[in-house]
Image: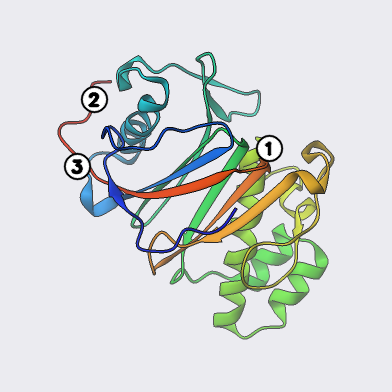
Amino acid sequence: MRAPEPPWPRLAPEDASRPALDAGDIQLWWWPESAMPELPRRERIGQLLRRTLAPCLGVAPEALAFGREPRGRPFLAHADAPDFNLTDTGGGTLVAVSRAGRVGVDIERHDRRVRAAALARRWFSADEAAAVAALPDEAASRLFLHLWTAKEAACKATGTGIFDNRLAQWRFAPAEGDPQVRALPPEAGGMAAWRFLRLAPTAAHTAVVALRGDARALHAFHALYRGPWPSR
């Protein structure tokens, strides 16, 4: 996988010019908050998710059926359905749709300030926490968010969630750029099966795509809102 260069093409998911999601493909859809109707967060996310996924199956958005895995990870309850995942933060929502394997995404704003050293001690491995604690505040916050997005994207791909020490079991090199995995929990399988990519839907955000599989192609789009939301 290679990070798509900004700016991402603008496209409505239902447009006929949308590329097909073929075997080995991943599509990323960035939905900017400012371009969407003002709705409660849960309803807004549900509606944009249906609009993004429905064209992959050739059905109306309201016809989509969802299920949940034992730990709550949602999936499309349709034959030959792609995998998907989403992440939401201030400024917008990022949706990943995959026919290349299980996918997870996580996003944060660059300007988010956190108690980096304390949170790293709570959630990360000892060496990762030490790397965060060794930095001045701004750099520590940046490294914490880089590690956090990698770890959470991985946990979302496996479907385990972040508890039961999962964040500490996923270990990454404390560095900029694409996440480099150093250790992973047993349910994740072999390290060679994983791909991680850091990207930025906007200059204000940093995001990670975690994929268990091999991607033939990755396409990213700035989603356009057109017309009324589908009925629930």
Nearer mark to the viewer, of 2 and 3: 2
Q: Which mark is residue 37?
A: 3
Residue 228 falls left or right of residue 68: left
| Apparent side of residue 4 relative to residue 193 in the rendered image (left or right) | left
- Residue 4 percent across, percent down from the top left: 47, 58
Q: Distance between the residues labelled 2 and 1?
A: 30 Å
Q: Which sits earlier in the primary sequence, circle 2 or circle 1?
A: 1
Are discs 1 and 3 less than 8 Å apart at CB?
Answer: no
Above/below status of 194 relative to 148: above
Q: What element carries label 1?
A: helix
* Circle 1: residue type: Thr
How busy is the neighbourhood of tag 3: few (under 14 within 10 Å), some, or many (20 plus)?
few
Return the x and y of residue 59 as percentages of the image width and height: 34, 17
- Identify the image quadrant of the C terminus: top left
| Mark 3 residue type | Pro
Q: How far apart are marks 2 and 3 (CA)?
A: 12 Å
What residue do we see at 18% from left, 38% from top?
A: 226
Compare residues 31 and 108 and report the one nearer the observer. 31
Q: Is mark 3 on a helix, strand or loop?
A: loop
Residue for point 36% across, 19% down? 58
Judged from this view, the residue extending furthest toward the bottom is: 136
Please name the residue shown 41% across and 27% down the image: 56
x%, y% of residue 83?
Answer: 55, 31
Q: Which of marks 2 and 3 is nearer the N terminus?
A: 3
Label 2 neighbour load within 10 Å: few <14, some 14-19, many 20+: few
- Residue 30: give x, y in percent of width and height: 37, 49
User: What is the number of the mark on residue 230?
Assistant: 2
- Residue 142 occupies quadrant: bottom right
Estimate how packed mark 1 is, as few (under 14), some (14 to 19) or many (20 or more) residues with alpha carbons within 10 Å.
many
Where is mark 1, residue-wise? 158
Disc 2 element: loop
- Give the residue at x 81% y 45%: 185
